[in-house]
Image: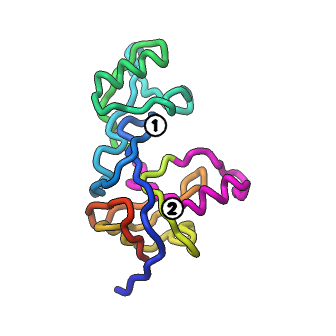
């Protein structure tokens, strides 16, 4: 299989608690289920047992998780003004990895967003620099990122970047090459 270098990894973000802010990382292991530790916890309302989602509680997006589930639950409860707990997140059928290029973010910031799409924070796991390429053209293709191989499956509803499944697990670091 012939590979063509198309860019580099410029940022890595892990979102340990769904709907909360992400944490920057220099390296991440991409597992068959996605980045290690990503979206491992959900916020659950202690009274109703329902999952609290960011679209209903936008304050969550500004909270940076510590990695301590008890401390994170206390911080979320304080921000929401009601008791919550963190529960291990179940498999909700989401994509394993979200990739967004700096170029896509720049286009969105300049107002180049397709109708029906959003320029809001894409909550990407891997931020890429892709001079001369556009990740939206990769759907159905395979891409090597660092030590991992990903199958690009689709564009997200908000239209920034692409979603991918992990075909070959491996480590990815800031600065790693991205090859089609």
Magenta region: 93-122
Mark 2, secondary structure of its residue: strand
Residue 167 x, y percent position in the rendering: 31, 66
Whole-angstrom CA distance, mark 2 to mark 1, is: 23 Å
Residue 47 x, y percent position in the rendering: 40, 13
Q: Please say which color scheme the image uses.
A: rainbow
Q: Residue at x 57, y 70 (%)?
A: 134
The verdict on residue 168 being magenta is no
The verdict on residue 121 being magenta is yes
Q: Which part of the image, by quadrant, shows the N terminus?
A: bottom left
Residue 67 x, y percent position in the rendering: 30, 33
Q: Residue at x 51, y 58 (%)?
A: 100
Mark 1, secondary structure of its residue: loop
Residue 148 versus residue 123 in the image, above or below: below
Residue on which the image places disc 2: 154
Q: How many marks?
A: 2
Q: Residue at x 63, y 58 (%)?
A: 106
Q: Is residue 175 left or right of residue 32?
A: right
Please tell me which residue lies in front, 139 or 29: 29
Residue 128 x, y percent position in the rendering: 48, 62
Q: Residue 2 is drawn in which quadrant? A: bottom left
Please tell me which residue lies in front, 70 or 167: 70
Residue 133 versus residue 127 in the image, above or below: below
Residue 169 versus residue 125 in the image, above or below: below
Mark 1: few, some, or many residues within 10 Å (few <14, many ≥20)? some
Residue on which the image places disc 1: 21
Q: Residue at x 57, y 45 (%)?
A: 121
The circle on residue 33 is none
Q: Which part of the image, by quadrant, shows the C terminus?
A: bottom left
């Amino acid at each position: 299989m012939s590979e063509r270098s198309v860019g580099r990894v410029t940022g890595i973000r892990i979102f340990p608690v769904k709907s909360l802010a992400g944490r920057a990382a220099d390296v991440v292991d991409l597992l068959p289920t996605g980045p290690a530790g990503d979206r491992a916890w959900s916020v659950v309302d202690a009274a109703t047992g329902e999952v609290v989602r960011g679209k209903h509680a936008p304050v969550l997006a500004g909270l940076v998780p510590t990695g301590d589930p008890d401390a994170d639950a206390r911080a979320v409860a304080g921000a929401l003004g009601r008791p919550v707990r963190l529960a291990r997140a179940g498999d909700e059928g989401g994509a394993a990895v979200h990739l967004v290029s700096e170029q896509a973010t720049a286009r969105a910031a300049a107002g180049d967003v397709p109708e029906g799409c959003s320029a809001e924070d894409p909550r990407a796991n891997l931020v890429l620099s892709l001079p001369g390429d556009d990740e939206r053209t990769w759907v159905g293709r395979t891409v090597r990122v660092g030590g991992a191989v990903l199958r690009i499956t689709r564009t997200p509803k908000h239209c920034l970047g692409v979603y991918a499944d992990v075909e070959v697990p491996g480590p990815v670091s800031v600065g790693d090459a991205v090859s089609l």
